[in-house]
Amino acid sequence: MSVRALFLDRDGTLMVDVGYPSLPEQVELLPGAAEALAALREAGYRLSIISNQSGVGRGYFDAAAVEAVHQRLLDLLAVHGVPIDDAEYCLHAPEDGCDCRKPSPLMIRRSADRLGVDPAQSFMIGDKASDIEAGRRAGCRTILLDPTGAGGTQADFVCRDWEDIVQAVRRITDRPVAAGSRTGSA
């Protein structure tokens, strides 16, 4: 089996989207995210955060604030036994015209290279069209996290919550995710 990963958007995917989080106390995991990631990691997926954090480029806060929020997220996931293998953050404002900001696939490709994973065997999971486009351009399968279920992007799967994400990954992987490893019903 080739090495594979879940490339994960941060705000609105792993944690509640509060706009421009700059303080560790603003970090709140989305319901079921940690449990789902634990099950998916057990099924052989490496985990990488891929996130635009334009608050730095816009002058709202500095890179140290991004690092503090990131560390709090890592700490909360660690409580559930979920280590994150890699992370890529774009700190540029949209108007900066950088090469890394999603929907560019650059952050995914760099992370995939560091982790030694095959994007074609991996997923990009996010809550915005730019996440899905970045994943598609990197060669990943894509999952849109949309609590309304409406979709509206070209994602391979549209899921309402993390339980649905586990089921979507389970349907197309060669190593099923253990049903008892997550919350909710099958």
Image: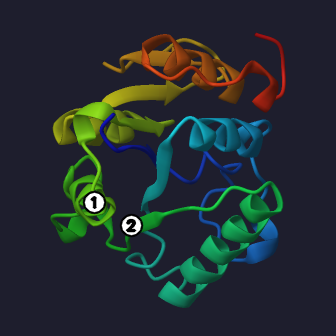
**Rounded to the nearest whole Å, what is the CA distance between mark 2 and mark 1?**
6 Å
Seen from the viewer's position, the closer of residues 122 and 98 is 122
Describe the element under mark 2 as helix, strand or loop.
strand
Q: Is residue 170 left or right of residue 37?
A: left
Residues at badges 2 and 1 in contact (C-beta under 8 Å)? yes
Q: Residues within 10 Å of mark 2 (few under 14, many from 20)?
A: some
Seen from the viewer's position, the closer of residues 14 and 173 is 173
Image quadrant where residue 174 sits: top left
Q: Amino acid at mark 2?
A: Glu
Residue 129 circle label: none
Residue carrying label 1: 107
Q: Position of residue 170 (x, y in %)?
A: 54, 18
Q: Residue furthest front?
A: 1
Q: Position of residue 27 (x, y in %)?
A: 75, 63
Q: Earlier in the sequence, mark 2 or mark 1?
A: 2
Residue 27 visible in the snapshot: no
Q: Which quadrant does the N terminus fall into? A: top left
Seen from the viewer's position, the closer of residues 133 and 120 is 120
Image quadrant where residue 10 sits: bottom right
Residue shown at 44%/58% (left/top)? 51
Compared with 33, 154 (above or below) is above
Compared with 5, 108 (above or below) is below
Describe the element under mark 1 as helix, strand or loop.
helix
Q: Residues within 10 Å of mark 1 (few under 14, many from 20)?
A: many
Q: Position of residue 162 (x, y in %)?
A: 67, 29
Residue carrying label 2: 88
Q: Amino acid at mark 1?
A: Met
Q: Is residue 50 left or right of residue 71?
A: left
Residue shown at 67%/36% (left/top)? 39
Q: Position of residue 128 (x, y in %)?
A: 44, 36
Residue shown at 32%/72% (left/top)? 92
